[in-house]
Image (cartoon, rainbow, N blue to C red):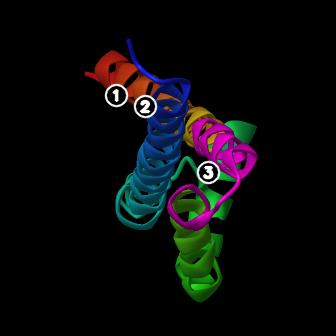
Amino acid sequence: MAQPEEGATARAWLIRAMGVLFGLLGGAAWAVLLGVLVFIVPRFEEIFERFEIESGLPVATMLVIVAAGAVRTWWFMFAPALAAAVGAPVLASVGGRSLAVAVAAAVFGMVSILLAAACVTLVVVGLFAPLVQLIGAVGEKH
């Protein structure tokens, strides 16, 4: 039979590993979001400009375009935030002596993943809804 200390050590290791995992996954999710804002949204902006529909875009699309512009302009402010989103859970899980800190780091990582997923969803909906309308309008003309 396992000693209670061994079980507690295994649980502590598992919780710390979850903090590292969720920290890395949260950082990857934020990196994907920033990549979409920096590299993909400008392509959609060009499409909207080419078809001269900038003034009739939905609010969600305009928010995505403004957010992408802010990220491209102030990238140096978002890079440390991304590093903190990855580093905080990982460092707290690996270097922290308190198990409560490791649990908090895992929860922070999970919340970070959920927030990034919500932002990516907003970006996708904000960009593709006007594009579908544009394709429908072009199809009706032909």
**Dot 2 lies on which element?**
helix
**Mark 1, residue position:** 138
Quarter assignment of residue 31:
bottom left
Q: Quick check: marks 2 and 1 in contact, CB under 8 Å?
A: yes
Q: Which mark is residue 64?
A: 3
Give the mark nearest the N terminus, 3 or 2.
3
Span of residues in magenta: 91-110
Label 1 and label 3: CA atoms lie apart by 23 Å
**Disc 2 crowd, CA 10 A, few/some/many (<14, 14-19, 20+):** some
Q: Position of residue 50 (x, y in %)?
A: 39, 57
Q: Quick check: marks 1 and 3 in contact, CB under 8 Å?
A: no
Q: Name the quarter where the C terminus is drawn.
A: top left
Residue positioned 61% across, 70% down in the render: 84
Residue type, label 3? Val
**Mark 2, residue position:** 134
Q: Is residue 15 left or right of residue 28?
A: right
**Disc 1 crowd, CA 10 A, few/some/many (<14, 14-19, 20+):** few
Residue positioned 60% across, 35% down in the render: 122
**Dot 3 lies on which element?**
helix
